[in-house]
């Protein structure tokens, strides 16, 4: 499975399927993605093969434990990394160039959800982390 940023400068391939996926509605995901939330697929960090542009990724410390990777050219959100889980990385599902092997399994941080964003599916909803 391959993915790339908006401008195509950053491209990667996943060597194995995602482990899990969720849709996060925390304020940081809203702001970093410019929307009602962000869908992420979790995988092993070692399974991300950077094809091009790894050095074009910039990291932003959105909290003490979290780093968010984005393309320095187009600003596209690429990944979410939590230092508490050093072997995992969460890839933004929206940047995949094909369908992921998994659909989001739950909504998290719905306590911070935007009032204009409706959750109209049957996925489990967790006030904070699920």
Image (cartoon, rainbow, N blue to C red):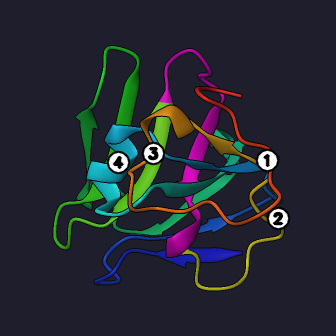
- Residue furthest to the left in view is 73
User: Label 1: which residue?
Assistant: 20
CA distance separating discs 2 and 3: 23 Å
Badge 2 is on which residue?
102
Q: Which label belongs to residue 69?
A: 4
Circle 2 crowding by C-alpha within 10 Å: few under 14, some 14–19, many from 20: some
CA gap between label 2 and label 4 equals 22 Å
**Closer to the camera, 20 or 59?**
20
Range of the magenta residues?
Answer: 82-95
Separation (CA) of disc 4 from disc 1: 19 Å
Q: Are marks 4 and 3 in contact (CB under 8 Å)?
A: no
Please say if 110 is above or below 105: above
Q: Are marks 2 and 3 in contact (CB under 8 Å)?
A: no
**Comparing labels 4 and 3, the label whose residue is closer to the camera:** 3
Quarter holding the N terminus is: bottom right
Q: Earlier in the sequence, mark 2 or mark 4?
A: 4
Q: Residues within 10 Å of mark 3 (few under 14, many from 20)?
A: many
**Residue at 40%, 17% in the rendered image:** 65
């Amino acid at each position: 499975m391959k993915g790339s940023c908006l401008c195509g400068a950053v491209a990667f391939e996943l060597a194995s399927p995602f482990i899990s996926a969720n849709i996060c509605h925390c304020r940081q995901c809203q702001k970093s993605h410019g929307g009602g939330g962000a869908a992420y697929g979790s995988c092993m960090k070692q399974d991300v093969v950077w094809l091009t542009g790894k050095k074009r990724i910039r990291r932003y410390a959105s909290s003490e434990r979290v780093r968010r990777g984005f393309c320095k050219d187009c600003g596209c959100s690429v990944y979410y990394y939590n230092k508490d889980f050093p072997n995992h990385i969460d890839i933004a599902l929206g940047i995949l160039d094909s369908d992921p092997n998994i659909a989001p399994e739950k909504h998290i941080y719905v306590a911070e959800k935007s009032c204009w964003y409706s959750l109209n599916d049957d996925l489990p909803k967790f006030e904070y982390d699920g």
